[in-house]
Amino acid sequence: MKKLSEQAPAKLKGVKGLNSVPKVPELLEKGILRAKHDLYIYKDGTIRFDATNAPLTHFTPRQIGVSVEKLRRLGYTHDIFGRELSSPDQILELKLQDVVISRRAAEHLLKVSKFIDELLVKLAGMQPFYRLKTIDDLIGELILALSPHTYAGVVGRIIGFTDSLVCFAHPVFHAAKRRDCDGDEDSIMLLLDPLINFSRLYLPGRVGGKMDSPLLLTVIVDPKEVDEQAHNLDTLDRIPLEFYEAAEKEKHISELADIIPTIGSLLKDGKPLKIGFTHPQKDLVAHPVESSYKRYGSMLEKILGQLELAEKIAAVDESYVAEKMVETHLLSDILGNMRAFFLQKFRCKKCGTKYRRIPLTGRCINCGGEITQTVFRGAVEKYVELVDKVLLKKLRDPYLKERVSLALENIKSIFEAEEQEQASLEEFMLET
């Protein structure tokens, strides 16, 4: 504390143990400074903010809350019609690696910048780097965007803010992260944070431990190298009549390749990557500003909300939605947890020694501590009631329905029903 010239924080959280192979801990001073700024760390030493991906190709200075002068300094000197930028209502085409972040994300990154500056001054004896005072000072700063289950982050530049809890970026930028814009969330980091705080020495030694870590940085995005899904984006500013006539005849989209130019066709022909738009908007944000998936707490609330929405939309088959939820997620989760329950190891509560089978004494051989399970009954049963009372009756596929019924019967035969004195709110929701 003397080294940092700081008072002890009210709350300082650590970890019980290190999962990395070399068992190298992070400097304690970093944790103290993070606690001071109310920041939380990821497994690799970085500080992240998760945001839902949203595509954006065009904007006006007014829509992103940035002055014309600042945008001119960032390289936006002319609008899409070639006129010099002078009005906050002129339409600009978004550059490939520029992003518009939420104001909540901006507040978070501002705290990160202050943490990094203090870290440089008090721990490294260097000059502060960011010197930011308000979120408006973040304009022009670089970030690193990283998708789950990948190893390469993509460098982006902040050019504006939105009230919506999303990260607006070019479709090519999202594709460079190997992500879609159908509700996927990615993380963003202030660039200097992973550059000075990330370390391979912190990563878990188990299989998959290096996943979701910025082992590589993509500094320049080449549109030719991203996923082909982004190449299928059309670049028209007006959809021709032939498109609607072909749609009426149920023609395949490939038959319209000559009249519907795409990003892929522009790149193939060596033409400049200029994208059009068909519907101008006064504002980028419309309610709701936050995904209901984030607003709902438990999985039960999320599934009930999805089914309720499916009931209201005439074009959606409610039974098909229920079958897909069971088939792609819930059933595999139930069966996987049941298998893990029967193949589990056991652990000493005191020293952490793991056993394939419980010792005959029922106590730890090393220290005499109490032995406990590593997979519990609750993990196996967490979706059983939901599937049994809500989803099973909506299934139409006889094969899937039989698989689900057999899985539920197996679980009920293994675990005896426990008497429950107090009914939970979730049970009440299932009954209604």
Image (spheres, rainbow, N blue to C red):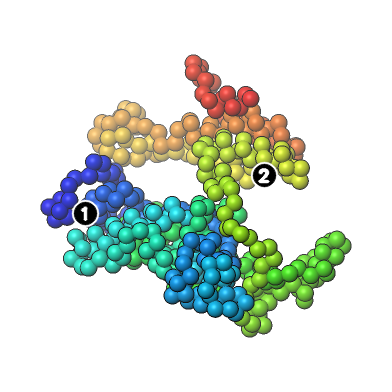
Left or right of 242? Residue 183 is left
**Which residue is the site of mark 2?**
324
**Residue at the farthest right position:** 249
Q: Quadrant of the C terminus?
A: top right
Left or right of 169? Residue 311 is right
Q: What is the secondary structure assignment of the residue under circle 2?
A: helix
Q: Which quadrant holds residue 63?
A: bottom right
**Residue at the farthest left position:** 2
Residue 18's mark? none
Kindly identify the residue that appears in the image at 62 percent across and 38 percent down.
Answer: 305
Q: What is the secondary structure assignment of the residue under circle 1?
A: helix
Given residues 420 and 13, the one toward you in this image is 13
Q: Is residue 355 above or below residue 201?
A: above
Residue kind at label 2, given as amino acid type: Lys
Kindly identify the residue that appears in the image at 85 percent across and 65 percent down.
Answer: 245
Image x and y of residue 256, in percent: 79, 71
Residue 302 shows in this picture:
yes
**Residue at the farthest front position:** 87
Residue 31 shows in this picture:
no
Image x and y of residue 257, in percent: 76, 73
Image x and y of residue 220, in percent: 47, 75
**Which residue is the site of mark 1?**
29
Label 2 crowd (10 A; few <14 / some 14-19 / many >=20):
few
Gap in angstroms between the C-alphas marked 2 and 1? 48 Å
Kindly identify the residue that appears in the image at 57 percent across and 47 percent down.
Answer: 288
Q: Which quadrant holds residue 407?
A: top right
Kindly identify the residue that appears in the image at 68 percent across and 32 percent down.
Answer: 392
Left or right of 325? Residue 423 is left
Count every numbered label the image shows and give the total. 2
